[in-house]
Image (spheres, helix red, strand yellow):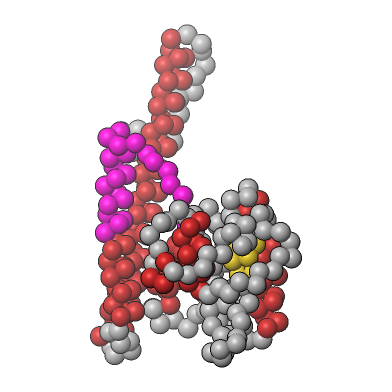
Amino acid sequence: MATGDYTRRVTATSHDEVGELASAFNTMAADLEAVDRQRRELVANVSHELRTPVSALRAVLENLVDGVGEPDHATLGAALDQTERLSRLVTDLLDLSRVDAGIVPLRRERLALQGFLDETVAEARLTGRQVSYVVRVDPPDLSARFTFITPNMCSSMHDCSVNEGDAWLSRWMPKFLDSPQYQAGNTAVFLTFDEDDHSANNHIATLVMAPSVPAGMRVSTAFDHYSMLRTTEELLGISTYLGRAATATSMRDPFHL
């Protein structure tokens, strides 16, 4: 054990004081072996976590130096993100040491997995590798007070057919409506589009789903995107409305939200 080998054990053949000493020795050896293994795993994990942002930052800077990439806002922003990530990792290590020392308690928090993965993929795309990434979180996390979900350019029917958009909706809408938040009766789902053909008489299809909304209900009142913004702010308990939402018609009472 003095040389760092914690795998050796003492054979206990009696149940007297000597046997109890041998058992205690084996317990101590097992504990020291576990601590040593955790220490080595921590060093390996920290090295990996530090290497990832350093490698990404290096790739971005190499692309700029070689003239492969342009020093635009997205590229410089990615470099800044990696630097901030390194800073957060160092802070996490300091916090971990304080928790281990019992100075501060360990507080668990929810992690928005979709946003975390999207940021990771966005950083990976800037390395210049010819690789495509698809991120799907199933089931979707609707635990936040407000969640904005948008499909890609194909599933949104912007670049692809209506059938493609219908297929996306058929996959995801049941998951939204089966979520614990919706089933609990305290979540509303708005399905709408963000553009039209710019004609005066064009109507944007908008569906409002909530347990309090009667099935098949139609409302003849004219609404716009500012109406949806005001309705969202009202449902979140925000009394100071943004911009034209202050004078927009709310959708809350007409749809029994």
Residue drawn 60% across and 87% down? 201
Examine the structure image and report whether residue 90 is included in the region drawn in magenta: yes
Q: Quadrant of the C terminus?
A: bottom right
Observer able to see residue 81: yes
Residue drawn 41% across and 23% down? 25
Residue 243, by quadrant, is bottom left
Q: Which is more toward the observer, 3 or 218?
A: 218
Residue drawn 42% across and 66% down? 246
Q: Position of residue 140 (x, y in %)?
A: 58, 60
Span shown in magenta: 87-112
Residue 64, by quadrant, is bottom left
Q: Is residue 227 left or right of residue 80?
A: right
Residue 52, by quadrant, is bottom left
The correct choice, above or below, for 79 with respect to 113 in the image is: below
Q: Position of residue 210 (x, y in %)?
A: 64, 58
Q: Name the residue at the top extreme.
A: 16
The tally of labels here is 0
Residue drawn 31% across and 68% down? 81
Q: Position of residue 228 (x, y in %)?
A: 52, 68
The correct choice, above or below, for 194 with respect to 91 in the image is: below
Q: Position of residue 70 (x, y in %)?
A: 30, 87
Q: Which is more toward the observer, 248 or 131?
A: 248
Observer able to see residue 139: no
Q: Which is more toward the observer, 149 or 212?
A: 212
Examine the structure image and report whether residue 48 is included in the region drawn in magenta: no
Q: Is residue 176 left or right of residue 41?
A: right
The correct choice, above or below, for 212 with respect to 192 in the image is: above
Q: Quadrant of the N terminus?
A: top left
